[in-house]
């Protein structure tokens, strides 16, 4: 059965004529949930192969667990030379709100009914649509069931639940094979402090649930 999101995207593509003036001014952003890794996460023998060559898989904050494709379709707004282009700048789901506010020309409120609203955490992806640089001034953060990560430019600090931090250079080592934390302890310290400040600011709780350090192995051990 086809995913309704794909059917919706296909219908918009068919509706758009060859002339930009007649195309609907609609932005479609399609992003996957790294869902194929489910096949191996829950007790499979080869879970780490699902997102090869990236390290780990869904549930973790290594690239195999967080790196997913995003397709932006906006015939009326994305320049023709950029159609089908591959953009390597990292984005995050927190950028979707900022992008919608930017493209719509709306304002993001600071309060509602006398209650303060948390400020947006992301940046608009619109510059990337045009081939420009994102206006990101803060690192990108992750946390999922005790797994942590922070990326600032080319540097990424990542931690599997209850294990030590690892530091990787995303420009030269996207597959996270060479841990550089001993070579650059000052960068690791700075990024860890940034992650801790973000966790406190965004109400991240300590993970007290099951220890899925090796997801699937605990489930297999419980089987008769």
Image (cartoon, rainbow, N blue to C red):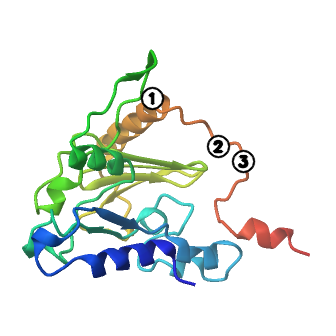
Q: Position of residue 32 (x, y in %)?
A: 45, 69
Mark 2 burial class by Cα count in 10 Å: few <14, some 14-19, many 20+: some
Mark 3 burial class by Cα count in 10 Å: few <14, some 14-19, many 20+: few
Q: Position of residue 18 (x, y in %)?
A: 14, 81
Q: Position of residue 132 (x, y in %)?
A: 10, 57
Please report contact status of discs 2 and 1: CB closer than 8 Å, yes or no. no
Residue at figure coordinates x 13%, y 54% from the top left: 133
Whether residue 12 sits left or right of residue 1 in the image: it is left
Give the label, 1 or 3, closer to the camera. Answer: 1
Residue ranking furthest to the front: 22
Residue at figure coordinates x 85%, y 68% from the top left: 222
Please report contact status of discs 2 and 3: CB closer than 8 Å, yes or no. yes
Residue identified by numbered label 2: 207
Q: Secondary structure at mark 2?
A: loop
Residue identified by numbered label 3: 209
Q: Is residue 46 above or below residue 182?
A: below
Residue identified by numbered label 1: 201
Q: Secondary structure at mark 3?
A: loop
CA distance separating discs 2 and 3:
6 Å
CA distance separating discs 2 and 1:
17 Å
Give the label, 2 or 1, closer to the camera. Answer: 1
Residue 152 numbered tag = none
Whether residue 75 sits left or right of residue 38 in the image: it is left
CA distance separating discs 1 and 3:
22 Å
Q: Secondary structure at mark 1?
A: helix
């Amino acid at each position: 059965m086809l995913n309704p999101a794909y059917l919706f995207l296909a219908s918009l593509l068919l509706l758009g004529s060859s002339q930009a003036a007649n195309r609907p001014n609609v932005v479609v952003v399609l992003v996957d949930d790294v869902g194929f890794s489910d096949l191996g996460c829950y007790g499979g023998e080869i879970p780490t192969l699902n997102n090869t060559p990236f390290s780990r898989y869904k549930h973790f904050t290594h690239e195999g667990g967080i790196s997913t494709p995003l397709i932006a379709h906006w015939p009326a707004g994305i320049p023709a030379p950029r159609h089908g282009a591959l953009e390597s700048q990292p984005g995050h789901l927190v950028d979707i709100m900022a992008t919608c506010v930017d493209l719509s020309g709306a304002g993001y409120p600071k309060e509602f009914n006398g209650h303060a609203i948390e400020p947006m955490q992301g940046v608009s992806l619109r510059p990337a649509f045009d081939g420009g640089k994102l206006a990101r001034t803060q690192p990108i953060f992750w946390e999922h069931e005790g797994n942590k990560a922070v990326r600032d430019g080319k540097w990424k600090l990542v931690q599997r639940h209850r294990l030590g931090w690892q530091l990787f250079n995303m420009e030269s080592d996207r597959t996270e094979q060479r841990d550089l934390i001993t070579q650059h302890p000052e960068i690791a310290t700075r990024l860890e402090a940034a992650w801790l400040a973000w966790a406190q600011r965004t109400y991240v709780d300590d993970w007290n649930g099951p220890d899925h350090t090796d997801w699937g192995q605990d489930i297999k051990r419980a089987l008769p």
